[in-house]
Image (tube, rainbow, N blue to C red):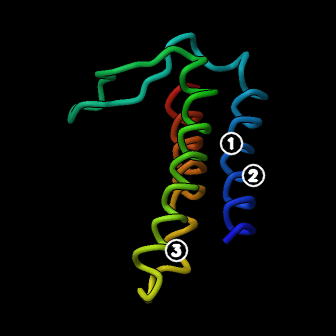
Amino acid sequence: MKRQIVLGSLVCLAVMVVLLLCWSWLPERIPVEYNARGDVSATLPKPAVVFGMPVLCCLLNVLVICQIQTRIRWSVFSPYLGWMMPVLAVVFCGMILIGSL
């Protein structure tokens, strides 16, 4: 359990490093939601996305793994659910970079 929490958190924080490396390329307001026509319908300030999203994914990673260990440890999917937040953090990072560059 500890190993998965540490590795998952490192992946989530690596997303922050990637976003920090791209800081100068990112706009001041980053699109986070699009409507059906593909127009931007919501944005967030750059610091909120670069720092907030990876930290939130880290916290959710710990919460998910703790829930897996205490409630659904016998599920066939439980070994894979612990990687849900790190994978989502990487996907969100890619979407942010593609959507704002």
The residue beneath circle 3 is 69
Of the two numbered discs 3 and 2 in the rendering, the one whose residue sits closer to the viewer: 3
Q: Are marks 2 and 1 in contact (CB under 8 Å)?
A: no
Q: Amino acid at mark 1?
A: Val
Report x, y in % for residue 34.
31, 31
Q: What residue do we see at 56% from left, 45% from top? A: 59
Q: Earlier in the sequence, mark 1 or mark 3?
A: 1
Q: Secondary structure at mark 3?
A: helix
- Give how far apart the Cα atoms at labels 2 and 1 are: 9 Å
Q: Quadrant of residue 27?
A: top right
Q: Earlier in the sequence, mark 3 or mark 2?
A: 2
Q: Amino acid at mark 2?
A: Leu
The residue beneath circle 2 is 10
Q: What residue do we see at 24% from left, 31% from top? A: 35
The residue beneath circle 1 is 15
- Give how far apart the Cα atoms at labels 3 and 2 are: 20 Å
Furthest-left residue in this view: 36
